[in-house]
Image (cartoon, rainbow, N blue to C red):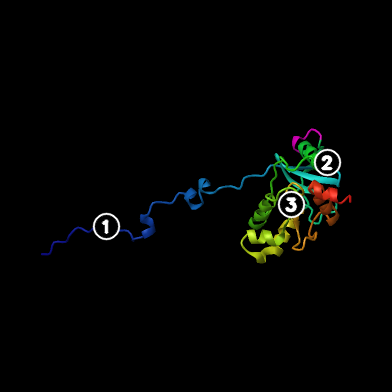
């Protein structure tokens, strides 16, 4: 007589996913700690500064100057990027900018203490940094800057970056001239460029013009 073995309950169907612990919902998205948010920029504001070269529109971003534009500027700021209009009086940054520009136009200042901020692409920022190294009373060429960047063939691109410099005078794009010394490519107008270079002329050069 055959003895019947007690039946064993059947194992449930094998499901590999069922054997894994449940994934918490927060693990399905990047951790906040792993994502670095882009710092918010301070709100902008703008004013008009009266100077020897006409009224300049000054744009501030927090405690730094983000724009200085001549009337009829070739590359004005984009619509909606200059913030609210304020009076220069009572605004410490604008007052300092106005005072230092006045001293510069009177030939009493060769450098500026006003902080600036720009938001160009990597190439433009490199060009603008090099502009800040051009000494007062001297000039350089687009080709020279291109060579400093490691490629003489970048002269035209350098010219475009120089022309789009948002902070005129303080970032001295007026000190860049053509290979033959000609005045070219100033977004504030060539007459103003000539005037700025004249202000910075060594005394012996300006005095020689009298004879």
Q: Residue at x 85, y 48 (%)?
A: 207
* Residue pictured at 83% horizontal, 41% vertical: 106
Is residue 67 in sight in this rendering? yes
Determine which residue is flagged by label 1: 9
| Position of residue 84 measured from the top left corner of the image (x, y, whole percent) | 79, 42
Q: Which residue is mark 3?
A: 138
Which of 16 and 203 lies nearest the eye of the viewer?
Answer: 203
User: How far apart are the two marked residues, 3 and 1, measured between alpha carbons?
Assistant: 95 Å
Q: Tell me residue 131's x, y (percent).
A: 70, 52
Residue found farthest to the top: 90
The numbered mark, 2 or 1, whose residue comes first in the sequence reads 1
* Residue 18 percent across, percent down from the top left: 38, 56
* Highlighted range, magenta: 89-93
Residue lying furthest left: 1
The reply, left or right, for residue 89 in relation to residue 171 is: right
Q: Residues within 10 Å of mark 1 (few under 14, many from 20)?
A: few
Q: Residue farthest to the right?
A: 211
For residue 15, what is the image quadrant?
bottom left
What is the distance, in whole Å, between disc 2 and disc 1 at their CAs?
A: 101 Å
Residue farthest along the bottom direction in this orientation = 153
Q: Local crowd at mark 2 within 10 Å, few (<14), some, or many (≥20)?
A: few
Q: Which residue occupies 85% across, 50% down?
A: 208
Report the disc number at residue 106. Answer: 2
Choose mark 2 or mark 1, whichever is in front.
2
Q: Earlier in the sequence, mark 3 or mark 1?
A: 1
Q: Is residue 70 visible?
A: no
């Amino acid at each position: 007589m055959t003895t019947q073995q007690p039946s064993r309950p059947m194992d449930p169907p094998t499901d590999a996913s069922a054997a894994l612990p449940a994934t918490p919902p927060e693990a399905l998205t990047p951790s906040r700690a792993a994502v670095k948010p882009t710092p918010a920029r301070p709100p902008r504001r703008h004013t008009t500064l009266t100077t020897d070269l006409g009224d300049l529109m000054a744009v501030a971003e927090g405690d730094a100057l983000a724009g200085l534009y001549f009337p009829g500027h070739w590359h004005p700021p984009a619509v909606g990027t200059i913030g609210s209009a304020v009076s220069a009086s009572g605004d410490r940054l604008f007052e300092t900018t106005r005072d230092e520009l006045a001293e510069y136009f009177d030939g009493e200042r060769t450098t500026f203490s006003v902080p600036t901020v720009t938001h160009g692409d990597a190439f433009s920022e490199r060009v603008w940094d090099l502009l800040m190294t051009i000494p007062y009373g001297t000039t350089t060429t687009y080709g020279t800057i291109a060579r400093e960047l490691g490629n003489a063939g970048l002269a035209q691109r350098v010219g475009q970056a120089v022309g789009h410099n948002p902070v005129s005078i303080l970032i001295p794009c007026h000190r860049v001239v053509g290979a033959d010394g000609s005045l070219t490519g100033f977004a504030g107008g060539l007459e103003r460029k000539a005037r700025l270079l004249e202000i910075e002329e060594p005394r012996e050069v300006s005095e020689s013009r009298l004879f």
